[in-house]
Image: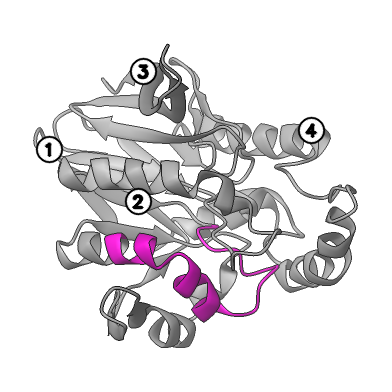
């Protein structure tokens, strides 16, 4: 099966979420939450992410994670990831309790597509403040894709991770995991990057984006993905959009969807004239959904 078939399959039985004038959605991808070691790329931006997530929770947004939320290729234990980043999972549990949480899986957390894995690892987490296990997201389902439909404009957003553009990252994901875990992870420690990684190799990134954009144009669908870590929100007639990632050394990016409009947003630490740091949200680009 080629990449077109793999993307089609992601949306074959995808749930359809409706949006109206009161709906607010935020789309994040590629957090790659790790186990707290020097290989945990999420450590650099964990405070930015938590502050942004708290903002979206307090302001009534529904959170959609597009996959690769947790780094399960380099790490074997989901329990360790939950323990290190328990504050994040606490906040995600609040979204879940209010029916404001939708989760997709990507290539680096493909195990989440198995119900047995999600039941075992997402029913509870260890809360450090109470020093006890508490409910996380029991019965949550991780999807390959979802469709977000604006009932006012009729516009539909087709949302998936984007790893379907690569055979190694989709059909052969177990081989990809083996190579990352036992070959590229050790080499990364001495500065050698994975040449097959769409986020780290420019040629692979461009090839992946070309395939995703081709699918969007051929199907006349607005396609939102992560995977390549390169944020993108172009004006019409371009149909391909990318949320970016949460592992850039200096910032995180996401897509906000409300009032028939998409916004590509960057969160970063600014510096005041007195040397104090502050959290800043910057809108990089906007796009109206009027079709």
Numbered badge on residue 286: 3
Q: What residue lies at 82% left-to-right and 34% top-to-bottom?
A: 203
* Nearer-N-terminus badge (1/2): 1
User: In this view, which residue lies farthest toward the front?
Assistant: 274
Numbered badge on residue 202: 4
In percent of width and height, residue 106 lies at 56, 59
User: In this view, which residue lies farthest toward the top?
Assistant: 273
1 vs 2, front mark = 2
Numbered badge on residue 20: 1
Q: What residue lies at 84% left-to-right and 67% top-to-bottom?
A: 179
Horizontal placement of 196 versus 266: left or right?
right
* Nearer-N-terminus badge (2/3): 2
Viewer-side residue, 277 vs 242: 277
> Is residue 73 on the magenta stretch?
yes
Q: Residues within 10 Å of mark 1 (few under 14, many from 20)?
A: some
Q: What residue lies at 79% left-to-right and 33% top-to-bottom?
A: 202
Q: Answer yes or no: do the residues labelled 4 and 2 have beta carbons within 8 Å?
A: no
Q: How far apart are the alpha carbons under marks 3 and 1?
A: 18 Å
Q: Residues within 10 Å of mark 3 (few under 14, many from 20)?
A: some
Numbered badge on residue 64: 2
Q: Answer yes or no: do the residues labelled 2 and 3 have beta carbons within 8 Å?
A: no
């Amino acid at each position: 099966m080629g990449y077109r078939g793999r993307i089609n399959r992601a949306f074959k039985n995808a749930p359809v979420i409706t949006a109206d004038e009161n709906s607010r959605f935020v789309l994040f991808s590629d957090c790659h939450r790790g186990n707290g070691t020097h290989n945990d790329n999420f450590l650099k931006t964990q405070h930015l992410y938590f502050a942004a997530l708290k903002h979206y929770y307090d302001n009534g947004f529904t959170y959609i994670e597009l996959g690769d939320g947790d780094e399960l290729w380099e790490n074997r234990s989901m329990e360790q990831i939950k323990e290190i980043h328990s504050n994040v999972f606490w906040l995600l549990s609040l979204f879940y309790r209010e029916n404001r949480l939708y989760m997709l899986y990507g290539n680096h957390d493909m195990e989440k597509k198995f119900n047995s894995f999600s039941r075992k690892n997402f029913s509870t987490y260890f809360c450090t403040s109470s020093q006890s296990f508490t409910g996380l997201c029991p019965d949550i389902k991780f999807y390959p894709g979802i469709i977000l439909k604006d009932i006012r404009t009729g516009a539909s957003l087709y949302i998936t991770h984007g790893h379907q553009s690569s055979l190694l990252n989709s059909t052969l994901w177990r081989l990809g995991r083996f190579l990352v875990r036992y070959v590229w992870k050790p080499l990364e420690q001495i500065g050698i990057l994975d040449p097959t990684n769409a986020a780290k190799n420019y040629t692979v990134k461009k090839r992946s984006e070309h395939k995703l954009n081709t699918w969007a144009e051929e199907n006349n669908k607005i396609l939102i993905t992560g995977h390549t870590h390169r944020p993108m929100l172009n004006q019409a007639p371009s149909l391909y959009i990318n949320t970016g990632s949460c592992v850039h050394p200096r910032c995180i990016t996401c897509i906000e969807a409300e009032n028939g409009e998409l916004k590509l947003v960057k969160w970063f630490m600014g510096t005041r004239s007195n040397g104090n740091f502050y959290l800043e949200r910057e809108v990089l680009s906007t796009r109206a959904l009027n079709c």
